[in-house]
Amino acid sequence: MGKKGKTARLKRKPAPKYWPIHRKESPWVVKPASGPHSLQTCLPMTLVLRDMLGVAGTRKEGKLILSEGKIQVNSIVRKKDDFPVGLMDVISMPDANRYYRVVPSHKGLILSAISKEDAKYKFARVENKTTTSVGVQVSLHDGTNMLIKVADPKNPVEVTYETFDILKINIADGQVAEKLKTKEGNTAVITGGKNIGVQGKIVEIEKTEAKKRHQALVTIEDDKGVRCQTILDFIFSIATNESPQVTVAEEPEENTVV
């Protein structure tokens, strides 16, 4: 008889390498539920609370904290311990006045402590645009979509967002506060591949003609003058010369107080 539905189990050995877990402590680990991020690019809430922040000692304690509505992801209360959080998601603990953003580092995805003011905004990369009968649907990297109504769908001059643009979105009302283009001269961070977490200035973006733009080679130069290359699909712009938008810092120290 064939398989029906998804596999609800995940062993520790094949789990993403950057997850902060002991591979031989026990055979099983929490498998992230289906959601806005794929298995390889997310962290389940249990790992965030228990293994990264240390606010829960066991999965059972993590479930209790979540069931009380004390944890928000992008200002939405999440109560499932297998909910997946991923790149640039904002995790809030209002009762403890603690706020974090999921950012890339050489370790993989980590949590960067941010202020309450910074937690009001999320950053999303434009992945695609689709013209509809009423306007333009903009697809973002976190699985969300924005429908922008325009006067003439065949000529949507009102929509100035391009693929790979970074949008600073007010979480409360979903309005775009600012746009950051992915172009030469801007500062970016690499979000995947062997150079994940490397930050630097975009020196060159390959001009693509015979291949998809997602696969275009991008050259990044860090503060020490060291250059590396990756594909455009792994580039996330975080700053211009004038106004830094996203701070990528090391993960916070563990704290056992909620």
Image: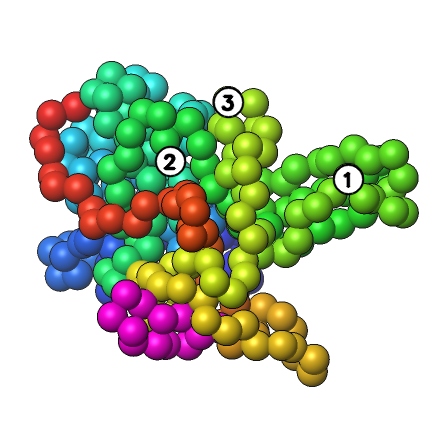
- Closer to viewer: mark 2 or mark 1: 1
Q: Give the vertical position of 62 relative to 47 (above or below).
A: above
- Within 10 Å of the Cα at label 2, are there few (<14), some (14-19), or many (20+) other Cα atoms? many
Instruction: Work out whether mark 3 precedes mark 2 in sequence or the reverse, and give the earlier one.
Output: 2
Left or right: residue 241 compared with residue 196:
right
Colour convention of the picture? rainbow
- Magenta residues span 218-230
Instruction: Name the residue at the bottom extreme.
Output: 210
Prevalent SS, magenta region: strand
Whether residue 51 can be seen here = yes
Tell me the residue at 17%/42% (across/down). Answer: 252
> Where does label 1 land, which residue?
158
Quarter of the image for residue 64 reads top left
Tell me the residue at 16%/23% (across/down). Answer: 258
Residue 188 in the image: state x and y as whole percent: 42, 59
> Where does label 2 land, which residue?
90
Q: Which mark is residue 175?
A: none
Left or right: residue 32 compared with residue 36:
left
- Within 10 Å of the Cα at label 3, are there few (<14), some (14-19), or many (20+) other Cα atoms? few
